[in-house]
Image: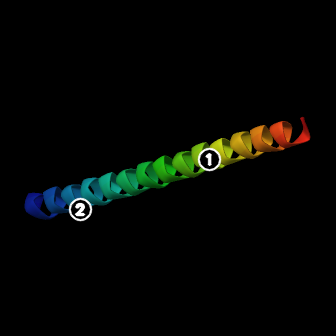
Amino acid sequence: MSFVIGYLLFVITHYSLLITHYSLLITHYSLLITHYSLLITHYSLLITHYSLL
């Protein structure tokens, strides 16, 4: 009986760690995408600025 409880705890821990891992990955990539889109916006504004000069 204690083996079943231990196994269930292991499975729950395992899947919660997996979920945490993937949510961190998703956060990481969304931050990267935000970062690059801000860079693109920044450079396009610079180009617009210099082309207006």
The residue located at (59%, 43%) in the rendering is 35
* Viewer-proximal residue among 37 and 23: 37
The amino acid beneath tag 2 is Val
| Residue neighbourhood size for the residue with mark 2, other residues' Cα within 10 Å, grouped as few (<14), some (14–19), many (≥20) | few
Element type at mark 1: helix
Instruction: Indicate the quadrant containing the C terminus: top left, top right, bottom left or bottom right.
Output: top right
Q: Position of residue 44 (x, y in %)?
A: 75, 46
Disc nearest the viewer among 2 and 1 = 1
The amino acid beneath tag 1 is Thr
Q: Which residue is mark 1?
A: 34
Q: Tag 1 or tag 2, which sits nearer the N-term?
A: 2
The residue located at (19%, 56%) in the rendering is 10
* Viewer-proximal residue among 34 and 22: 34
* Viewer-proximal residue among 42 and 20: 42
Q: Position of residue 36 (x, y in %)?
A: 59, 47
| Residue neighbourhood size for the residue with mark 1, other residues' Cα within 10 Å, grouped as few (<14), some (14–19), many (≥20) | few
Check the image and report above or below for 11 versus 24: below
